[in-house]
Image (spheres, helix red, strand yellow):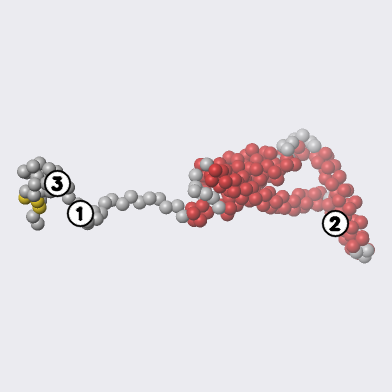
Amino acid sequence: MEVNCQRCQAPIDPESSYCSACGLPQLTYSTEETPGPVTQQPWHEGNDDAGEVVWRTALRISFLMAIPTGIACSIVSPLGNYGLLWMAIAAAWVVAIYVRRVQPPWITAGAGIRIGLVAGIFSAWFSFIISSIALFTQRYFFHQGSEIDSQFKLFVDTFNKSYLPMVQQMNPDPAELAKAQGFVAWMRAPEGQAGLALLNLPIVCAILLVISMIGGVVGARLSARSRKHN
């Protein structure tokens, strides 16, 4: 194909970028698209990525946070009566720290529930261990078993004052009242004290785990709101 200079119309070598006659640079345009390197951008698919949990980071944060939370919820803490509140705050805090470390686009409520559940399991485990060690130490090393038994006896007496009249009012049958009195007598025995302690453990743990999951949801919502403002 013959190429002429855009100024003087002199013939130009197709491989040359300048006119040999007048020296004008020759600009050529091509309609053909030249493929270039394609840079693949990371794609964050909202629902999938936000629902995934980097468990190595989540477990590390949950384990570290479980130590102070377990102490705060145990019987050795003067603030142990507010254990449910500490558990919810700790779970929300774990989720907030996780979001700050991992920096996902956002985090779903389901991911917050799972992280809160793990944080609650660790915290409840530490609280149970600390409380068990404290009770064992009080009873066998500090010889405070009589005080523990007297507190439990006071609890049974309070329960007895409301339980037996309620049974008698609902069912005046003497056989039913005798069963209720036998149950109270069993509670007063050492076997009853141990049995109630074992029964109370899963109930308390279940309540703590539910509160932790709620705290995880709150932490996920607050983290998503703070990232929107930023």
Q: Residues within 10 Å of mark 3 (few under 14, many from 20)?
A: some
Does the residue at mark 3 contact the one at mark 1 (Cβ under 8 Å)? no
Would you name the residue on which mark 1 appears? 30
What kind of element bears circle 2? helix
Q: Which mark is residue 26?
A: 3
Q: Name the one closer to the observer, 26 or 32.
A: 26
Residue 230: x percent and y percent? Answer: 52, 41
| Residue drawn at x 49%, y 47% as measured from the top left | 104
Q: Could you tell me which quadrant the N terminus lies in? A: bottom left
Q: Count all numbered tags in the image, as a single digit.
A: 3
Q: Residue at x 89, y 59 (%)?
A: 167
Upstream in sequence: badge 1 or badge 2: 1
Query: Label 3 amino acid?
Result: Gln
- SS type, badge 1: loop
At numbered mark 3, what does the secondary structure look like: helix, strand or loop?
loop
Q: Where is residue 222? Give x, y as percent.
A: 59, 45
Could you tell me if residue 95 is visible in this image?
no
Q: Position of residue 112 (x, y in %)?
A: 58, 50
Amino acid type for the residue under numbered disc 1: Ser
What amino acid does circle 2 point to? Phe
Q: On the rendered structure, is 130 left or right of 51? A: right
Disc marking residue 183: 2
